[in-house]
Amino acid sequence: MTRCLLLALALCLAGTLAFAAPAQAPQVPVKGVVTMLDLGAKSCIPCKMMAPILVELEKDYRGKAAVVFIDVREDNDAARKFGIRAIPTQIFFNRAGQEVSRHEGFMDKKTASDTLNKLLAK
């Protein structure tokens, strides 16, 4: 029960994270910035597990990298645009906007941070 409440709280506090709705989908990758794009769905269990991680990453990397979440059940075009086969899928882009890494499934915070740090170091 406590875990569910923490997850709900994390989702509520995610206001600073770019949780995109179809009408206001952000430009991805974010121009000139290292970008982590997470494509998933708010109703998917592994995606729900990642929600608090994305909130933490957005906070940790604010001003250094963009962390963007797009719900592909609400934005089918994003799923097609990025060639999504499974959710969640994380795509990392360098500052030039080139895709440099892709992962399907749950990604822990350390792995995501390590990938972002490598891109920021370049």
Image (cartoon, rainbow, N blue to C red):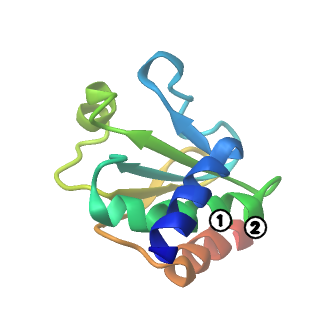
Residue 53, located in which quarter of the rendered image? Answer: bottom right
Q: Residues within 10 Å of mark 1 (few under 14, many from 20)?
A: many
Is 117 left, or right, of 80 in this rendering?
right
Q: Is residue 62 above or below residue 31?
A: below
Q: Amino acid at mark 2?
A: Asp
Dot 2: element: helix
Residue 90 at x, y percent in the picture: 40, 59
The image quadrant of residue 59 is bottom right
Residue 57, labelled with which disc? 1
> For the point 79% across and 55% down, which residue is it?
62
How far from the left and from the top, in percent, is residue 117?
Answer: 67, 75
Side of 33 relative to 94 (left or right): right
The C terminus sits in image quarter: bottom right
Q: What secondary structure is marked by label 1?
A: helix
Picture quadrant of residue 19: top right
x, y percentage for residue 107? 41, 74
Amino acid on which the number 1 mark rests in the picture: Leu
Who is closer to the viewer here, 45 or 18? Answer: 45
Residue shown at 53% from the left, 73% from the top: 112
- Residue furthest to the left in view is 85
Residues at marks 1 and 2, CA–CA distance in whole angstroms: 5 Å
Residue drawn at (55%, 77%) of the image: 109
Is residue 14 left or right of 107 when viewed as pictured? Answer: right
* Residue 79: image location, x then y, percent: 27, 37
- Above/below status of 10 relative to 41: below
Q: Is residue 30 above or below residue 44?
A: above
Image quadrant for the N terminus? Answer: bottom left
**In the rendered image, which residue does mark 2 sit on?**
60
Q: Are marks 1 and 2 in contact (CB under 8 Å)?
A: yes
**Mark 2 nearby-residue class (10 Å; few <14, some 14–19, many ≥20):** few
User: Residue 37 or 120: which is nearer the viewer?
Assistant: 37
